[in-house]
Amino acid sequence: MRLRDLFAGWWKKREARQHSKRCSRRVKITISSRVMNSASESGDQDHRVYIFFEARTIVGKGGIWDPSTNKYYYIDITGKSLHILTLGATIQKEDFDVGMQVGAMALIEGGCGLVMAVRDGFGIWDFSKKKLELVATPYGVDSGWRMNDGACDSRGRFWAGRLFDTDETKPGQIYRLENDGKTATPVIDGICCTNGVLWSPDNTLMYCGDSTYKKIYVWDYDEESGTPSNKRLLIDTSKIFHGVPDGATIDKEGFLWTCFFDGHKMARISPDGTVDRVYDLPVKRPTQPCWFGDKLDTLLITSASKDVNIANCPESGNILKIHVGVEGQLKAKYKLKTKSGRQPGSP
């Protein structure tokens, strides 16, 4: 073997080691082992974990806070249920049986209900009728596929990815529910378990994780047409964390906040794929963070109790609260166009 080849091999291994060190460098936020029971206790500003609500979900997810109504919405995927908390001096809770698994949801602009990614495709939950109407079934009914995570883009189109229920290694598709409320356009292929669908604050980048392979990807994004392109790897989390990347949100600086299911953690990840912070959580299966509070600098985090030893992780299935001191942004709403071209609920 020539000397040049030996040197090239050594240099490649050196670069790989340096990359690994860069990826694993992080600021670890030490969470107090004492879990607070009330957000009004002193210390709410110091990154400690509070129990926001004892939800006791099987697989909680999909949290949305609406400051205009002071309501917090979340789902229990396995429980096939929607839950609405009205916040005030006391918390009032409403529970609804959706009738099928819900993977993600978004508020509909105008206040008439929620758009949902459900087992058979997309549906609309009407607040007045208190029931779900299926509006698009892009892969058929009772096919073995179900919708998993999703979110709305800045133009009010709702995106969600399908997951094969009994084999998460099957490549799925991510669909875009158009504003007509009935057309589901397949856009992205090859993601097995869609989680953490997000857009950068300037709407030029789209993010999505594949929990099956513990990777998070990024695309260039055309906001006008809703077209992602130039897919590339943002971060391979298998080299850094136990557990898999699950639901996520994004802050105003463009950093991702990702929960690690089975990993007891939530991480803040920079737009270049560097891990900026890591939070140790008192639940084994955190599922999704959601921005909350007057300054949007607090996160509410859903979690799962399914297949967890509750004796070891008694807060599993509950909703956690952490003040993180970084400003986030509210989730985009679905802009459902009626035949008249107006938003439901608009004058």
Image (tube, helix red, strand yellow):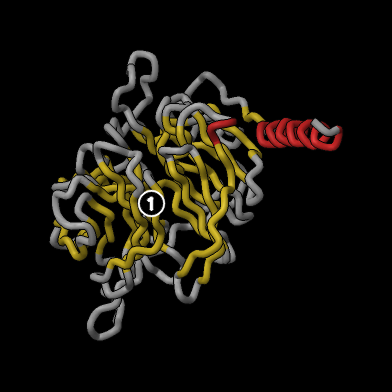
Q: Is residue 269 above or below residue 179?
A: above
Residue lying farthest bottom? Answer: 340
Residue 251 horizontal/vertical position (percent): 57, 52
Residue lying farthest front? Answer: 1
Question: Left or right of 77: which side holds 296?
Answer: right
Which of 21 and 311 lies nearest the eye of the viewer? 21
- Residue 85 seen by the camera: no
Which of 174 and 48 lies nearest the eye of the viewer? 174
- Residue 326 seen by the camera: yes
Amino acid at circle 1: Ile
Residue 33 horizontal/vertical position (percent): 53, 19
Question: Left or right of 75: which side holds 287?
Answer: right
Mark 1 neighbour density, 10 Å: few (under 14) some (14–19) many (20 or more): many
Asked which secondary structure carries label 1, the reply is strand
Which of 159 and 281 lies nearest the eye of the viewer? 159
Which residue: 50% across, 71% down?
223
The quadrant the N terminus occupies is top right
Residue lying farthest right? Answer: 3
Q: How many marks?
A: 1
Residue 30 horizontal/vertical position (percent): 61, 25
Residue of label 1? 64
Question: Left or right of 151: which side holds 229?
Answer: right
Which residue: 36% across, 57% down?
174
Residue lying farthest top? Answer: 311
The quadrant the C terminus occupies is bottom left
Residue 287 horizontal/vertical position (percent): 40, 38
The quadrant holding residue 83 is top left
Which residue: 27% across, 44% down?
164
The quadrant holding residue 317 is top left
